[in-house]
Amino acid sequence: MIARALAGAGVEWAFTVPGESFLGVLDALPGAGIKVVATRHEGGASFMAEAVGQLTRRPAAVLGTRAVGAGNMAIGIHTARQNSTPLVALVGQVKREFLGREAFQEVDQVESFGRLAKWAAEIDDPTTARATVHEGLRVMASGRPGPVFFSLPEDVLDLAAPRGRAPQSRDSASEAPSPPDPAIVREIVDQLRRARRPAVLAGYGVIASEATDILAELSTRLSVPVFNAWRRPTAFPNDHPNYLGMTGYGAPDTVQKRISAADFLLVIGCRLNEVATFDYKLPGRRTRWAHVDLEPRHAHAGLMAPDLPVAADAAQFLRAALDVANGRISIPKERRSALVAERAAYVAESTFDEAAVWQGPGIHPGRVIATLERVLPSDALLTTDAGNFGNWYARGFHFGREHGFLGPTSGAMGYGLPAAIAASLAQPDRTVVAMCGDGGFAMTMNELETAVREGGKPIVLVFDNKRYGTIAMHQRHEGRALVATDLGPIDFAAVARATGAHGELVTRDAEIEPALLDALSAGRPAVIQLEMDPRWVSPDKFEE
């Protein structure tokens, strides 16, 4: 019953470290048409499930055993919640007769790990199991998507589920947002038209509703600049003349300066998290703003409520706005001229010069990004881990209409490789490149064997500065000692070869492109270890 319900909710992939506490569900998944992938760690499994959900907008499942498996899965559940990604977490539990007796690996899973999810329940009664499963799947898909958590006592799974159908009175379709009020849509379009310095901030809601092209049309019609929220670089095509950059880490100074100066800001499909808003400095105190989201922000914890909140799917709103904007609208020439100048300033700040000579040691990170942009196919998908290396792609890789991207707004380390493996399995004809620091990559590099075994072909770039560089940066800036941030060397290329993947070490700029071409033609997972001077912090900072 559980397996059929998952398949009915769109689950095609399940990632797991198998455990004896949920063998009943494991038995049933292949028969329901769900592909099961064994991973080397539940953290990697949960990242893979989140990546499939973020990429396809259909949920994937992650399965683990009791408290120890759930503890390892927690990082991916948290990431799915932060990323607004549909995901189903299924965790085995001790037999019902052992509950409350300090049984092997026992913990109250709903009250602990389940609180990381959007919704959680324990299925402890076969007579209500069907309704519980369907309620969780309904909550997962309704409103702002997110992860749901099922705790599964071992003895319940092999019991017969009563015949019958799940309740249908509260399905997700009935809870879809109503079409936006035409009067509010017209007011927002009018504000964008009349404002002296309007702007749009686009997030994952635009990607998930496949509304990028509609937003581009609206931006063109109204001559309004668009910014993408942090780690949402594909929400708006970066080659569009109205695109002015991505917020957050790595953003050039022009980004925060221009959004802060907006007299009207449309925030669409964006959760306005700490990094995306430059520590909650956006929207500015004097900026009038609208928030279009499945769950618009309200005033709480010192945050301002929007002047115009609109509970709507991004595509639904943008279609209505475009209908309004297609009427007779005139835009002042001064505003058009200003946008041309702002675009030129952004391009100048976000382009790395491949001709620039770097004497080393190691590679120039900007050269890597420029080479990727030039060599990769136009539909390549990039994933990212956490770390200062991410400042370089955030600044200098220009994502076109066909590019894909997966990244954790939770800032979780270890995400890049598992996400790339999942993307490569889900879309095997696509070139997938993971960008990782040596710290984050080492956390999940055991999953290289998973990629080799399952036939995935991700290419992994490891920016190796032999330290936890972001934390070392904070230590230096705060005048602290560099405690616990220096790391020893690892031959990552040799690790890759040991698992059956392709591995190559790059120590200077001239080797970057040949190594990338070798990886693209390898026909198997590949790791390119990039030796990097630890003094590089960002495109703006080189610390002696």
Image: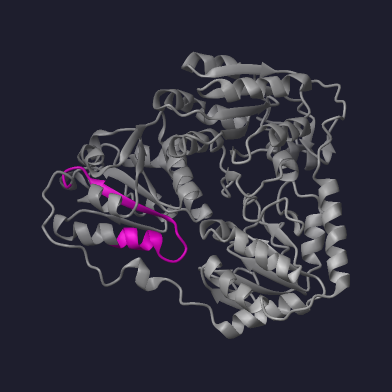
Q: Position of residue 259 (x, y in %)?
A: 77, 63
Above or below for 257 versus 491 = below
Range covered by the magenta-colored residues = 135-156
Above or below for 195 versus 358 = below
On screen, residue 11 versus residue 491, left or right, reads left
Residue 20 sits in which quadrant? Answer: top left
Residue lying at the far bottom in this picture: please name it.
183
Q: Examine the structure image and report whether residue 284 is included in the region drawn in magenta.
A: no
Above or below for 273 versus 289 = above
Residue 342 sits in which quadrant? Answer: bottom right
Considering depth in this image, is 104 or 380 the residue closer to the camera? 380
Which color mode does the image show? one colour
On screen, residue 370 versus residue 41, left or right, reads right
Can the viewer see residue 527 in this picture? no
- Which image quarter holds the C terminus? top right
Looking at the image, how many numbered discs can be counted on the residues? Answer: 0
Q: Position of residue 179 (x, y in %)?
A: 49, 77
Can the viewer see residue 304 in this picture? yes
Residue 213 sits in which quadrant? Answer: bottom right
Q: Residue at x 73, y 55 (%)?
A: 240
Considering depth in this image, is 15 or 215 the residue closer to the camera? 215
Q: Residue at x 30, y 42 (%)?
A: 34
Q: Residue at x 62, y 73 (%)?
A: 322
Above or below for 469 versus 314 = above
On screen, residue 387 versus residue 94, left or right, reads right
Q: Where is residue 382 in the image (x, y as percent from the top left)?
A: 60, 39
On screen, residue 113 versus residue 95, left or right, reads right
